[in-house]
Amino acid sequence: MPDKLPRVRFAPSPTGFLHVGNARTALYNWLFARHTGGAFLLRIEDTDLDRSEMRHETQLMEDLLWLRLDWDEGPGVEGPHAPYRQSERLGIYREHTDRLLAEGKAYRCFCTAEELEAERHEAAAAHRPQVYSGRCRAVSDTESVARAAAGEPFAVRLRIPDHPLRFHDLVRGAVEFPNETISDPILVRSSGMPVYNYVVTLDDALMEITHVIRGDDHISNTPKQVAIYEAFGWKPPEFAHLSTILGSDRERLSKRHGATSVASFRAMGILPEALVNYLALLGWGAEGGTRELFSLEELVHEFRIERVTASPAIFDWEKLHWLNRHYLKAADPERIAELAWSHFVSAGLLPSHNAIWQVTTASVEAWFGKLLALFLPAVNQLDELPVKAAFVFRFSPAAARANDENAALLATEASQKVLAAFAARVAAHSGPITPELFRAWMNEIKTETGAKGKDLFHPVRIALTGSHSGPEFDRFIPIVEEGSRLDLPVHVLSVRERIEQFMGGGR
Ligand code: GLU
């Protein structure tokens, strides 16, 4: 009989944003399922009722779908193992606890917090491992039932077996934990709430998960979970523990390292295909290659769990930006324009696409296309665009003059002659200024003043953009000229307005 198709799951707790580490876990599970033709489940682990929030769950699902990681079973899709939210499965857990208690695989623990604390103190003083003594193992069944019936609070603990706990890890090979180092784990707290190790195991087993692929922060939980499988007489799944992701300082990646949530990458203007490609490379590499560019479809084809490395991965912004630049260039320009537009709206530079503006949008959109063609190649992520294009929208001639570096450049006699000659031509001309006209003027000014190269172009560039370096005249002149005729939230100064204000010492 052929082996059953793999079934994997991503099991986030909706207590915060989906961050890089968990997104990679989701991706590897999804790739594994899609590569093998198996199933990818989404299970919401919301038994921590105080910290779980619906908005996080919603955001999490949105983030997964943004990355194009869809699930075959889970909230919104449902399936044979529903419900897929742990808070809706408490009855299932209770039945299984009753079974373990009845079979003597688990026992009620009546120890109070103070008693447990005292035990830990003693163990520490005697330099013994601080594991629970198992005192309540000795409470007889009759006594246990009677005390529970009398209302005495109790937790339910699993009897850890008298042998080492072993499992096979697809990333790390054979892993073994000596049983003496493991306390009889609590399965259900005295509040009646079952704990993570217990419910994760029950659900993985009941949902017929064949491979548990998750972060290595869970590796010390795995022996306890293996013991739970054993108590029920179930065969444990395969495990794969993914290495930690570190920041460039080799510390565990955290908020201190800047943005780490998928939502924040999205807000910055990182494309989902760039992030997916990047996350895939964080701990995995294709067979025999140095290849780094992979579409999601190519990843599905190439992904093998055996190629996942056990050594920590270091988050590398430069590489993410390199990939993002690649995908910004490769993507459909209309899609990028749409995304880029919203960054200008946030910066207050472009109108949002609403009914009132609909009349002007066609011309504004055409103009925006040219603006984007000019600035897009210069950015790593879309939110850098408004800053790169700032001189188009928020040019201050006064600030351009006041800048120290500019002031030195402008102080020379050659600069003053060039600027005067340029201003005179603008004054004598009526109508729009084209790149052709501009070039003709600059040739005349060159002959007239004898200035050439930097001496000729820098002063004019400063007067029009505020800086002596930047995009070619031919490319930005049409943008400011056309922009000045559009109805925009911020008036774009034309070449004429720029030079007039600059010469007049205006704002
Ligand atoms: N809810 C757990 C977490 O988010 C799941 C861990 C697991 O995959 O078993 O860390």
Image: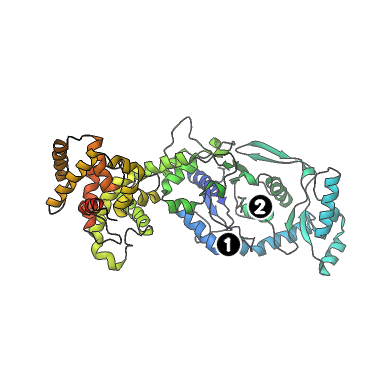
Sequence-wise, the earlier of marks 1 and 2 is: 1
The numbered disc on residue 201 is 2
Q: Residue 368 at what x, y percent from top left?
A: 27, 53
The front one of 388 and 342 is 388
Left of 149 or right of it: where is 460?
left
Q: Residue 367 at what x, y percent from top left?
A: 24, 53
Quadrant location of residue 45?
A: bottom right
- Residue placed farthest to the bottom in the image? 150
In the image, the residue with mark 1 has its CB under 8 Å from the nearest atom of ligand 1:
no
Q: Residue 499 at what x, y percent from top left?
A: 22, 50
The numbered disc on residue 83 is 1
Q: Is residue 432 above or below residue 282?
A: below
Quadrant location of residue 343?
A: bottom left
The residue positioned 20% from the left and 41% from the top of the image is 418
Asked whether disc 1 touches disc 2, contact meaning CB atoms under 8 Å apart, the reply is: no
The front one of 178 and 257 is 257
Left of 87 or right of it: where is 159?
right
